[in-house]
Image (cartoon, coloured by chain):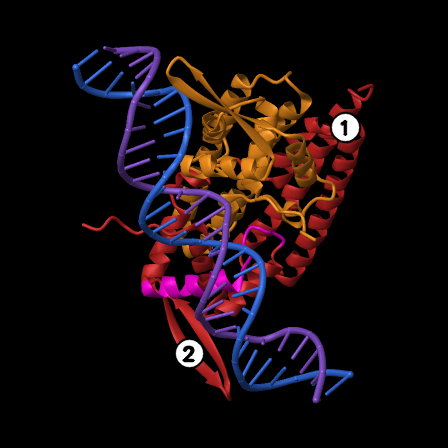
Chain colours: A red, B orange, C purple, D blue
DNA sequence: CCGCTCATGTAACTGGTTACATGATTTA
DNA sequence: TAAATCATGTAACCAGTTACATGAGCGG
């Protein structure tokens, strides 16, 4: 008896995107990922094209090649088996890798600020604050292109992005304060 | 002229850990990662042992094999070149992959809640809230084992974990409210 | 006509995962 | 003494990255 196949985070996320966008091409998926304010999904061709072929082989997607004039276009659609896989990924139950603190590259770096000189630490915090400003702008422009109102869950994701930036800014402020409190070195 | 070698996130994080823990073995690094409340770094043997050998070949770590009785122990130490690499990774300038919203597997899943029935959505939100409770407990026990006071940056990381869970709980509450507002389906 | 974007892919590489192997030491 | 943990690794696999190739359509 075959144990049910496991799919990667990227695979399941892609599955979800195809479901959400409706029939779409790997190119559409890639563009969507690249425009997102998250660097998590690079959307590189070498990742997405083979991935969607894999999902097709597993019966989670079906492809239909069209041809407007001489331009070919391959559209994938989620099958009912694909829907089931998507639901299983979302949970409940939540898979262990979903039960975690979120991954923040700024936190990873802040952990080792002790290796820097006090001046460098202050510079780093400033740079990090600027980076969050930049992210904030990206989230905002993303929110505008994908005008909420579509569905409440897209709105929830946008809201998550907003809150995420705000919270991390507040955290950075705390870090900055803890720096000045030891500023006599 | 060789362009300066790039290192992966895991490589740099490991470098930082070795710097922070002082001379230590791959086993120590693995244990540290596995006990962390984050699932980001699995700390699998097949990842860490070759990785630290790589860092040694690149001159960022030096190894010293000891032998207490019959038990062998290999200890790595960060070189000055390793310190430089660590500082470069931390920044500034922050590398592009650090300038991003944080990665939250709950957000990734919430995006596609539209595929579920209203009842399933409510179950999911409950499960997610429970998951965050679980994470909160893990963060707390982590905080206790790595008693802050060591350095302010460890404290900052612990604080980040605390805030992270709180913020996401607040976000989940919002999601839940947006569900009930459409509960007539 | 040149360059840009659209669009689909492949090839080579490599970092990380899972699983296994080995042996010493501690604990029930 | 059997099982669990400490401790070090290797081998096979595979997903994702970078870089390249190809060709259609479009704007200046």
Which sits earlier in the primary sequence, circle 2 or circle 1? Answer: 2
Q: Nearer the viewer, mark 2 or mark 1?
A: 1
**Tag shown at residue A65:** 2
**Do the residues marked 2 and 1 share a common chain?**
yes
**In the image, A5: left or right of B121?**
left
Q: Residue furthest right?
A: A184
User: x%, y% of residue C25?
Assistant: 35, 13
Q: Quadrant of the C terminus of chain A?
A: top right
- Chain letter of mark 2 equals A
| Picture quadrant where residue B169 is located | top right
Within the magenta stretch, is there residue A77?
A: no
| Picture quadrant where residue B185 is located | bottom left
Query: Would you place residue D4 above or below residue A125 in this image?
Result: above
**Tag shown at residue B173:** none
What secondary structure is the stretch in magenta mostly built from? helix
- Residue at 61% across, 35% down: B60
Residue for badge 1: A117
- Chain letter of mark 1 equals A
Q: Which residues are magenta?
A: A37-57
């Amino acid at each position: 008896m075959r144990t049910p196949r496991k799919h990667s985070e990227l695979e399941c996320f892609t599955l979800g995107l195809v479901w959400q966008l409706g029939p779409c091409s790997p190119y559409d998926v890639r563009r969507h990922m690249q425009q997102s304010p998250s660097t998590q999904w690079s959307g590189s061709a070498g990742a997405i094209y083979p991935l969607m072929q894999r999902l097709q082989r597993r019966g989670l997607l079906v492809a239909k090649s069209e041809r407007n004039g001489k331009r070919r276009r391959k559209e994938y659609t989620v099958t009912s088996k694909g829907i089931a896989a998507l639901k299983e990924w979302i949970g409940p139950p939540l898979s262990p890798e979903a039960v975690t603190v979120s991954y923040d590259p700024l936190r990873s770096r802040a952990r080792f600020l002790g290796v820097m000189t006090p001046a460098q630490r202050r510079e780093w915090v400033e740079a990090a604050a600027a980076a969050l400003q930049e992210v904030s702008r990206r989230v905002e422009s993303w929110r505008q292109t994908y005008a909420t109102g579509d569905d409440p869950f897209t709105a929830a994701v946008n809201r998550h992005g907003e809150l995420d930036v705000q919270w991390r800014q507040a955290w950075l402020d705390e870090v900055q304060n803890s720096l000045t409190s030891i500023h006599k070195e």
